[in-house]
Amino acid sequence: MTNNSKEFDCVEMMHQGALRIHEETKGMSMEEELAYWERKNQEIRRKYPMMREAREEYGNTE
């Protein structure tokens, strides 16, 4: 019998991230949640400016 233990489980990581976001946003009004996502968006843009440049370089500007 083989051992199927994983060192990294992407699905589990996604579930943990979704749970963390749920906990951070539960009880927020729609306006508060929109502000939360705008704040997170700005944080990511500041932290990873090269991602935006790469998207523009390859023509994906959505």
Image (tube, rainbow, N blue to C red):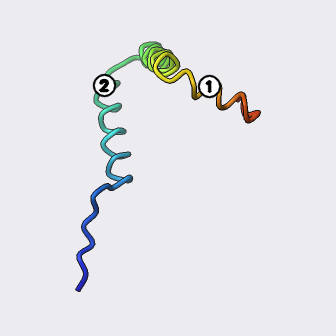
- Residue 21 in picture, x, y percent from top left: 35, 31
Q: Which of 47 and 31 is in front in this view?
A: 47
Question: Residue at 28% of width from left, 30% of height from top?
Answer: 23
Residue 56 left/right relative to 20: right
- Residue 42 in picture, x, y percent from top left: 50, 15
Q: How many labels does the image show?
A: 2
Q: Quadrant of the N terminus?
A: bottom left
Q: What's the amino acid at mark 2?
A: Glu
Characterize the local packing of mark 1: few (<14), some (14-19) or many (20 or more) Cα atoms within 10 angstroms.
few
Residue 60 left/right relative to 51: right
Which residue corresponds to mark 1? 52
Q: Distance between the residues labelled 2 and 1?
A: 26 Å
Locate residue 51: give its quadrant.
top right
Question: In what element is the residue under mark 2?
Answer: helix
Residue 42 left/right relative to 21: right
Q: Which disc number belongs to residue 24?
A: 2
